[in-house]
Image (spheres, rainbow, N blue to C red):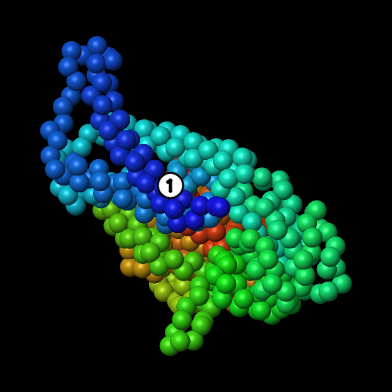
Amino acid sequence: MPWRPVYHRIIVQLADAATTLVSFIAAYYLWLLLPLASGATAGPKIDLDPSHFILMAMSAVAWVMIFNFLGAYSYQRFTSFTTEIKIILKTVFWGLLSVMGLVFLLRSTYVPRTFVALFSLANLVLLILEKFLLFYTARIIRSRGRNRKTVLVVGTGNQARRFVEAIQRHFCWGLDIVGFLDVGKDRVGRELFGKKILGTTHDILPVLHHYPVDEVIATVSTRRLGEVREVLEVCEREGVPVRIISDFLGKIAKRFRADVIYGLPIISISYIPHNQFALAVKRAMDIVISSLALMALTPHILIIAAAIKLTSPGPVFYDWYVVGFNKKPFKSWKFRTMVVGADQIKDQLAHLNEMQGPVFKIANDPRVTPVGRFLRKYSFDELPQLWSVFKGDMSLVGPRPAGPHELARYESWQRRKLSIKPGITCLWQVSGRNSISNFNDWAKMDLAYIDNWSLWLDCKILLRTIPAIISGKGAS
């Protein structure tokens, strides 16, 4: 009989918490021994107080919460070891941020940077070792016929065949097929992948009573979703879990949420990120980073403003209305990089446009001033947009804002760019910028960002933005 999933989840959570605690202890002793290895007669000392032990315990809890938030405990049979490592890297990153926050909130005594680095390294190594042991222990146990689940597959089409082929390739998943149910009677009694087609969907109840079934996998096309209703109702009464594999669900799997409002079952389908906690963290990052950047860069902003004013007649800033989240207009600012009246002569340069689509781009735009060319190369002209980020009109990462005239020329599918806040940097910014000459490619990058959005993706784009700015790669 297979373990109940909740027991397995609790075991893994306890193992993760214990590994984090051991990492703290290992980092402490490594920190003490490190000077001795370099020839010192005595190592450093940390005066341990209750806040250190509270920090250690809360960190273990935080690690488990982050693992859970990243989906580490959701149906681990299908999780590869590579995926586990990716989740560990993300967890250690976000965990360290939470530790820094806990140190601040607890007003703990001095925590050395060397200790934090050693804890990060120890935690990363020990978590990978722990997951390796759990992963391969589960494989060994399942290969010996234990901790396995018996599944009944509903459907015999392409979806069912692909699922069964995947099960056969991954014996370590620990799934054994009892048989199949088909929507029609024509193939009942035949075999598929060496397993018998036991009946139709109407035979679900006697099949469940006759065979030991731990889980039902319903594989149906969109046009036949209604035909598995009886299967769902019977499985609900019998207490048998059901998983549905459908071509329709593939399009909304990451975007739908089930709710009950006044007793009415409602499925909400969103085509934008809807994880409220993650969005709140994203907004907090925008506020903190933009405010710190504005304060730190104030001397540079003043120098740039003076350079613009001294070398070109006209205002320091260029302000114009752009279209933001849900097509709401807002005023945006940049440092002025063109001569005064540049917009009025834009039509005269239309034949030089190198971007296919609604956006106007010229590699060596004659309207750009010498100072403006330098600012554009290193994206310094966009520093004032940090104020828009702080206000909430923009985000640090997101699709580039569109002007009203550009939006009027968007194709229907391109308008989904406006379903989230625009940003200062994006995939286009770190993928060559103006070396991409087709707006369709640019739009596809923005939609890929929306479809795959996560806090981790934002962090990766921000980290890639720094070398892109320093090198001036792809800038005009």
| Position above or below: 243 against 288 | below
Can residue 4 be seen in this snapshot?
yes
* Residue 465 locus on image (x, y percent): 47, 48
Furthest residue toward front: 210
* Residue 156 locus on image (x, y percent): 78, 65
Q: In the drawing, does residue 281 fall left or right of residue 150?
A: left
- In front here: 350 or 197? 197
| Position above or below: 284 against 140 | below
Report the residue marked by disc 1: 12
Q: In the drawing, does residue 292 fall left or right of residue 87?
A: left
* Residue 416 locus on image (x, y percent): 57, 71
Q: Residue at x 53, y 78 (%)?
A: 267
- In front here: 385 or 11? 11
Packing grade of label 1 (10 A; few <14, some 14-19, many >=20) is some
Q: Residue at x 16, y 37 (%)?
A: 110
Q: In the drawing, does residue 358 fall left or right of residue 377?
A: right
- In front here: 209 or 298? 209
